[in-house]
Image (cartoon, helix red, strand yellow):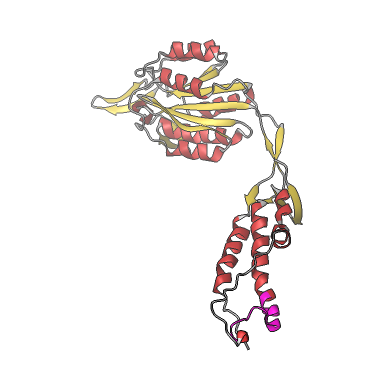
Amino acid sequence: MPDFSIFGFGSGSITFDWPWVFAALPLPLLVRYLLPRVQAQRSAALRVPFIDDFGEGDDPARAPRRRWLLLPAILAWLLLVTAAARPQWLGDPLELPISGRDLMLAVDLSGSMEQEDFEIDGRRVNRLIATKWVAGDFIERREGDRIGLILFGDQAYLQAPLTFDRKTVRELLNESAIGLAGKYTAIGDAIGLAVKRLRNKEVKDRVLILLTDGANTAGEVKPLQAAELAAREGLKIYTIGIGADRMTVRSLLGRQVINPSRDLDEETLTAIADATGGRYFRARDTEELNEIYRELDRLEPTEKDGQIFRPQRALYPWPLAAALLLAGLIPLLPPSRTR
């Protein structure tokens, strides 16, 4: 929409989206001088000998008073026309890098994600906390991508639609909790939901990063069927299997070494990635998980081609409010008194 810049102040300027509205400024004068004047009809039923006691309209002393009363009306009209022209405050031009990539994160919230087999700064944490810690930094680095978030358990839910607002996506990921979507794992439904949300033929690159620590145990869509659908839609899927291979636990028989990732279906996750042209990664600890996201940065680099954006703020409420205030005060002004 074209606009008309009239004022510039330091780092911004005031523009009008509809400057042609100012053509209506002389409208009251045109009405005043072009339309025929209404003649007052005088009744002959009563004749008053002292007409000066009742006729105040022709008193020359009142002319300056009438002209003074026109000032707030004229100012109210000017403000009303200014508000109708839609004034906008435009800030400094900003360059927004746009990569042309839609990237969706799908994170497993099933009950097994509470397994504490990861460490952050020497402190043992569960798998979801490690995912938030690493994936959050990954989200911050994806400048120029539209990013969305899917959380899945028994079912898959769209937590954040595709957006350039990386901060909000990261906050929504940090607010997620284990068991929020159920205790089982619907990998196929998560892929199916991602296909639905990433079905945009105008976007060149569409990527799904799916993180889970188990196998498909819920949902209506089988993972490989969903992967075939994703491949037909041109959606690339990177899968991440998370969880340690060895973990020492205490039991009645003493310390035992177990495999906390025995339920991880690496075969299916690998097949999903291969079917869509992606890759399967294995994250056994925090460092491996962090390295995977760094590798994803290299595989799907952000681009620096951008577009110019100028933040704007509508200013019309101010002149509109002032015009209404003046219009409301005019009838309250005290009437003139005869001398």
Q: Quadrant of the C terminus?
A: bottom right
Q: Quadrant of the N terminus?
A: top right
Give the quadrant of residue 185. Answer: top left
Q: Residue furthest front?
A: 45
Q: Is residue 55 magenta?
A: yes
Q: In this view of the protein, can residue 12 be seen by the observer? A: no
Q: x, y percentage for residue 308?
A: 71, 39
**Residue 62, relative to residue 281: is it above or below?**
below
Q: Residue at x 70, y 34 (%)?
A: 306
Nearest the viewer among 185 and 296 is 185
Q: In this view of the protein, can residue 62 be seen by the observer? A: yes
Q: Is residue 50 magenta?
A: no
Q: Residue at x 42, y 17 (%)?
A: 188
Q: Residue at x 36, y 33 (%)?
A: 180
Q: x, y percentage for residue 326?
A: 59, 67
Q: x, y percentage for residue 127?
A: 42, 30
Q: x, y percentage for residue 109?
A: 39, 29
**Residue 42, relative to residue 53: is it above or below?**
above
**Residue 335, relative to residue 211: is it above or below?**
below
Magenta segment: 53-66
Give the quadrant of residue 66. Answer: bottom right
Nearest the viewer among 47 and 28 is 47
Q: How many marks?
A: 0
Nearest the viewer among 264 and 33 is 33
**Residue 308, relative to residue 190: is it above or below?**
below
